[in-house]
């Protein structure tokens, strides 16, 4: 349950992420805010054995778990609490809470949360039934394309494809691109998809090379943009990644092309160091202002400079890329530089650099 | 006693005493020591199969359970995979007893006749019964938040639709990394330990299997899992895992 929802519904003061919150009905116990320096109640956050804790001032605290979120209902007094004097209980009568009332309250919250989940699922299912039908149709396209390639001469599918006409290869590449793009739509709806399956050995250079080939044709024909892919230093070693890592080159190259000034190059460089690979994607295009550098990784955010340059886009790509890299304990960084020859012609344009590191085997 | 007699009789006597001691020790400790007090058998995990990938691929029995015909069965068969196709779960016992090494399972429209939860119910039940069973989730419902458990419980996932080379890479990766004796030996040992078998009992079972691997014979399961005969569920579970181990040699 999200903090905002818990805050709206909670009848009791609580702690979340080390912050103390009042509820709509009851403020924080004064002692917890002003007198208590030790904040012993916070130890409950990491507790695995107990969900109840009596602090040094004698107040009851209760840990509440909602999937990944932990809350502590703090500074309350159970009626049978012998550490609090009867006089104090009278003064703090509003904070005297029967544990059963908390149980009932939590059950209600659980019910509300389940209802919300069901509604979200139902909405997704009804809104995306079209998407399901589209996937079914795509299955037919996949089967027919693969059957066509399989009829070509060769010992196995891969060799048949390799020795086939470039049209067949483009057709199969389109099919692979559709597979990836459908996967990305799944991630938008269900971000857990990023960590589906087991991690396996993946060579980032080969992944970027594959996507580069897919996009090169379009880039050169439509926008007069060349994609350069180079690896520097030692041979690029494999990384241990989830399957979703294949969306990274797709997103970064697609973005670099979309926001590249026609006639300029997109440069992709991979550098193998001792135990990691650094990937750098550069283009000349609209610069992101300093204050929006973090925002571009937010879901549905499109920087005004990007919107002005390219109409299409929904602001999902960089969010997906960042989520995938976070799942691999890495981070996508953005740097912009005005010190390019093109910036002299148009100061809104400059060198855009996206880079990240991943450990190699 | 002459020098001649003592020179011969003394070593013979020592040899006989040593021989009897080894026999008694082995009987008391269920140990496989030889005359020189060395283990007759190595660790089961030390036996590495010498199978080429093509042979391993041929021996891996795969079933695709999908109500649609989207899985490229003919392409896989053409490349030497032993692959069957069911449009729904027609023989649950086959799945449960480990006849198939890899089950590629759709989530919808495949098992409503046996489980309210359809594919998820089948997946949960098989994993509960035979934790060694490799199951690949194959569905176009990967966007569906309510089916999260299906994807979490599966050993691997293939999104639907996917291109053939991607599917092949996923299955090859499973064959190379998961369809290996060590994984199944570990799972068998885990099952035995959970059922309070001692290390000595486990070693005894391992030795049975080593003998069968060496002799290339089919074991008498009643004698391998003698103590599990009274608990049929455990017996079938162990037999399913152990059969897969032997299949890999």
Image: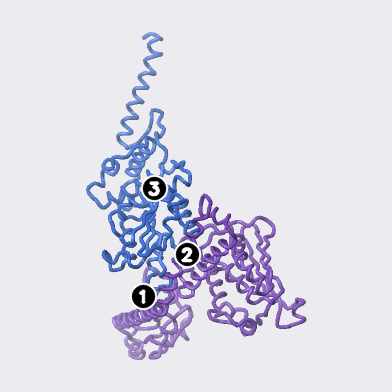
Q: Which chain is purple?
A: A
Q: Which mark is residue A52?
A: 1
Q: Which chain letter goes with mark 2?
A: A
Q: Position of residue A148 (x, y in %)?
A: 49, 60
To the question of a shared chain for discs 3 and 1, the answer is: no
Q: Name the residue that disc number 2 marks.
A: A142
- Residue B133 locus on image (x, y percent): 36, 55
Q: Quadrant of the N terminus of chain A?
A: bottom left
Give the residue at mark 3. Answer: B185
Which mark is nearer the camera, 1 or 2?
2
Dot 3 crowding, Cα within 10 Å, few <14, some 14–19, many 20+: some
Mark 3–mark 2 distance (CA, rounded to whole Å): 39 Å
**In this rendering, position of residue A197 left or right of residue A85:** right
Q: Is residue B113 above or below residue A22?
A: above
Vertical relation: A330 (above or below) A116: above
Q: Is residue A9 visible?
A: yes
Near mark 1 (Cα within 10 A), the count class, few <14, some 14-19 or many ≥20, is some
What kind of element bears circle 3?
A: helix
User: Tag on residue B178?
Assistant: none
Extreme-top residue of the structure: B2
A15, A33: nearer the viewer = A15
Q: Colour of chain B?
A: blue
Give the letter of the chain under mark 1. Answer: A
């Amino acid at each position: 349950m999200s903090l905002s929802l818990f805050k709206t519904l909670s009848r009791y003061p609580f702690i979340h992420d080390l912050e103390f919150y009042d509820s709509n009905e009851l403020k924080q116990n004064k002692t917890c805010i002003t007198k208590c320096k030790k904040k012993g109640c916070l130890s409950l956050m990491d507790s695995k054995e107990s969900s109840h804790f009596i602090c040094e001032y004698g107040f009851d605290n209760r840990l509440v778990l909602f999937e990944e979120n932990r809350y502590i209902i703090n500074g309350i007094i159970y009626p049978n609490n012998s550490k609090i004097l009867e006089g104090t209980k009278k003064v703090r009568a509003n904070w005297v809470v029967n544990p059963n009332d908390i149980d009932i309250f939590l059950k209600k919250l659980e019910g509300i949360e389940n209802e919300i989940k069901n509604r979200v699922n139902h909405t997704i299912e009804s809104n995306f039934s079209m998407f399901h039908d589209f996937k079914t149709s795509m299955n037919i396209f996949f089967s027919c394309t693969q059957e066509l390639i399989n009829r070509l001469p060769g010992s196995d599918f891969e060799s048949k494809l390799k020795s086939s006409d470039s049209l067949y290869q483009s057709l199969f590449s389109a099919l692979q691109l559709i597979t990836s793009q459908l996967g990305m739509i799944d991630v938008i709806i269900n971000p857990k998809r990023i960590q589906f399956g087991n991690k396996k050995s993946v060579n980032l250079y080969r992944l970027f090379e594959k996507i580069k080939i897919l996009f090169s044709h379009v880039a050169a024909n439509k926008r007069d943009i060349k994609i350069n892919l180079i690896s520097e230093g030692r041979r690029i070693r494999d990384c241990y990644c989830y399957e979703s890592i294949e969306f990274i080159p797709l997103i970064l190259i697609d973005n670099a092309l979309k926001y590249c000034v026609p006639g300029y190059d997109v440069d992709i460089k991979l550098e193998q160091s001792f135990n990691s690979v650094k990937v750098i994607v550069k283009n000349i295009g609209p610069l992101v202002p300093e204050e929006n550098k973090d925002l571009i990784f937010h879901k549905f955010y499109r920087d005004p400079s990007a919107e002005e340059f390219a109409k299409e886009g929904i602001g999902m790509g960089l969010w997906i890329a960042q989520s995938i890299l976070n799942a691999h304990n890495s981070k996508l960084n953005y740097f912009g530089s005005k010190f390019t020859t093109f910036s002299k012609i148009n100061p809104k344009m400059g060198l855009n650099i996206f880079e990240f590191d991943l450990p190699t085997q | 006693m002459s020098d001649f007699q003592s020179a011969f009789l003394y070593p013979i006597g020592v040899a006989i005493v040593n021989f009897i001691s080894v026999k008694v020790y082995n009987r008391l400790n269920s140990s496989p020591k030889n005359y020189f007090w060395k283990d007759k058998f190595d660790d089961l995990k030390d036996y590495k199969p010498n199978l080429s990938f093509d042979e391993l691929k041929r021996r891996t029995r795969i079933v695709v359970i999908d109500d649609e015909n989207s899985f490229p069965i003919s392409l896989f068969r053409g490349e030497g995979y032993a692959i069957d196709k069911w449009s729904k779960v027609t023989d649950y016992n086959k799945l449960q007893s480990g006849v198939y090494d890899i089950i590629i399972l759709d989530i919808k429209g495949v098992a409503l006749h046996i489980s309210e939860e359809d594919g998820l119910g089948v997946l949960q039940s098989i994993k509960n019964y035979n934790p060694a069973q490799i199951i690949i989730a194959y569905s176009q419902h990967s966007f569906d938040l309510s089916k999260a458990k299906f994807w979490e419980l599966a050993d691997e996932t293939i999104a639907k639709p996917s291109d053939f080379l991607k599917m092949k890479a996923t299955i090859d990766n499973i064959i190379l990394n998961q369809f290996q004796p060590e994984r199944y030996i570990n799972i068998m040992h885990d099952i035995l330990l959970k059922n309070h078998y001692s290390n000595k009992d486990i070693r005894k079972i391992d030795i049975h299997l080593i003998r069968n691997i060496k002799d290339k014979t089919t074991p008498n399961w009643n004698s391998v899992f003698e103590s599990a005969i009274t608990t049929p569920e455990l017996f079938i579970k162990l037999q399913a895992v152990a059969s897969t181990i032997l299949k890999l040699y």
